[in-house]
Structure formats: C-alpha cells, structure tokens
Image (cartoon, rainbow, N blue to C red):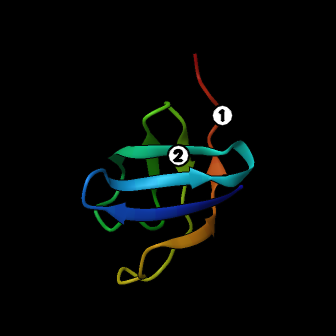
Amino acid sequence: MKIMIRRSPEVGLSVYVPKKDLEEPVVEMERETLWGGWIRIANGWVLELPEMAEDTRLPITVEARKRPETV
C-alpha cells in the first residue's frame, strides 16, 4: 500500500494512508534509521518499509507492506 511518511515538530514521525484517509503517529520503530525495517503506528498496524538511503528526505511516499495481524 502507498503511504506518506512525514516529520512534524508536534507529533514527530507520522504516516498517512490515502486510501483509508488515515493519519497516525509512529509509536515504535525496528531501526533507528527507519528504512528497511518495520514501524508500528498508533492504531496498532505494523508496516514493513523498503530499504532506502539513511539520508532520504521527508516527506516521502513509499510502498509499504502491512503485516498480518496476530491474535
């Protein structure tokens, strides 16, 4: 799914999902550099991010994969 990642002074990192009209803050990251790992957003979704250069500028739209929810 396409997502937009941006950084704001009030929230920090946040994710916007256009198809769901959903914007949520990032609450947990697998990697400090963000790219190539997973992130968890406030609604509980875990998204796999693509490998990108550490100095990639935000905001950016990327293709992310949502991990299946586990019970």
Q: Which residue is mark 2?
A: 23
- Label 1 neighbourhood size at 10 Å, few (<14), some (14-19), many (20+)? few
**Position of the N terminus by quadrant:** bottom right
Q: Which amino acid type is marked by label 2?
A: Glu
Give 24 or 27, whichever is nearer the viewer: 24
> Which quarter of the figure has residue 33?
bottom left
Give 68 or 41, whichever is nearer the viewer: 41
56 with respect to 63 (left or right): left
* Count of marks, rendered view: 2
**Position of the C terminus by quadrant:** top right
Q: Residue at x 62, y 28 (%)?
A: 69
Q: Residue furthest left?
A: 9
Q: Which amino acid type is marked by label 1?
A: Pro
Q: Secondary structure at mark 1?
A: loop
**Residue 67 vertical position relative to residue 29 in the rendered view, above or below:** above
Q: Which residue is mark 1?
A: 68
Q: Residue at x 68, y 53 (%)?
A: 18
Disc 2 to disc 1: CB gap under 8 Å: no
> In 3D space, how far apart are the residues under numbered discs 2 and 1 (Cα atoms)?
19 Å
> Which quarter of the figure has residue 2?
bottom right
